[in-house]
Amino acid sequence: MIGITTLAAEKARKMMMDNNLSPEANNGIRIGVKSGGCSGLNYVLDIVDSPADNDRVFERNGVKIFCDPRSYLYLNGTEIDFEDSVMGGGFKFNNPNARRSCGCGTSFAV
């Protein structure tokens, strides 16, 4: 399962509305991983209008979360949070599968 905090869900819903997407429809956020970054894998988060055919779908705090099967192997148990700060605000990923993360928090290794 992939979770999202209340604050992160509020920010995701606002981003959807800013992009003329309704959180009440089949819109949501897609979370995934791609190769790269200083630790080996980068987190990817996008606002999308629907899940892909093979996505796992979760709904938490009023937000649908979509994740492709390959990324889910690395992200199962992750909680998406949001942090407001001058030096690095934005979505943060609390991933119990990450053995190490880079300082910027956007890259990890398993």
Image (spheres, grey):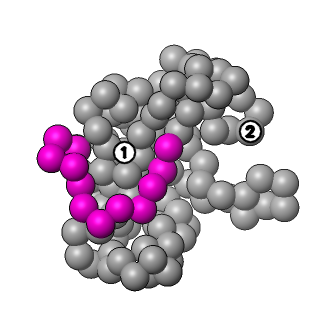
Of all residues, the one furthest to the right in this rendering is 86
Q: Let me know if residue 51 is in the magenta part.
A: yes
For the point 46% across and 34% down, which residue is it?
Answer: 33
Quadrant of residue 19 within the rendered picture: bottom left
Magenta segment boundaries in residue numbering: 44-55
Compared with residue 81, is residue 71 higher up or lower down, i.e. above or below? above
* SS class, disc 1: loop
Q: Earlier in the sequence, mark 2 or mark 1?
A: 1
Give the residue type that dot 2 points to: Cys
Query: Would residue 31 be found to the left or right of residue 64 on screen?
Result: right
Give the residue type that dot 1 points to: Ile
Asked if residue 6 can be seen in this view, the reply is: no
- Give the image location of residue 78, x and y in percent: 45, 40
Residue holding disc 2: 104
- Please tell me how crowded label 1 is: few (under 14), some (14-19), or many (20+) other residues with Cα within 10 Å: many
In space, the residues marked 2 and 1 are separated at their CA atoms by 21 Å
- Please tell me how crowded label 2 is: few (under 14), some (14-19), or many (20+) other residues with Cα within 10 Å: few
Compared with residue 20, is residue 47 higher up or lower down, i.e. above or below? above
Quadrant for the N terminus in the image: top left
- Give the image location of residue 89, x and y in percent: 72, 58
Of all residues, the one furthest to the left in this rendering is 53
Compared with residue 75, is residue 83 higher up or lower down, i.e. above or below? below
Residue holding disc 1: 2
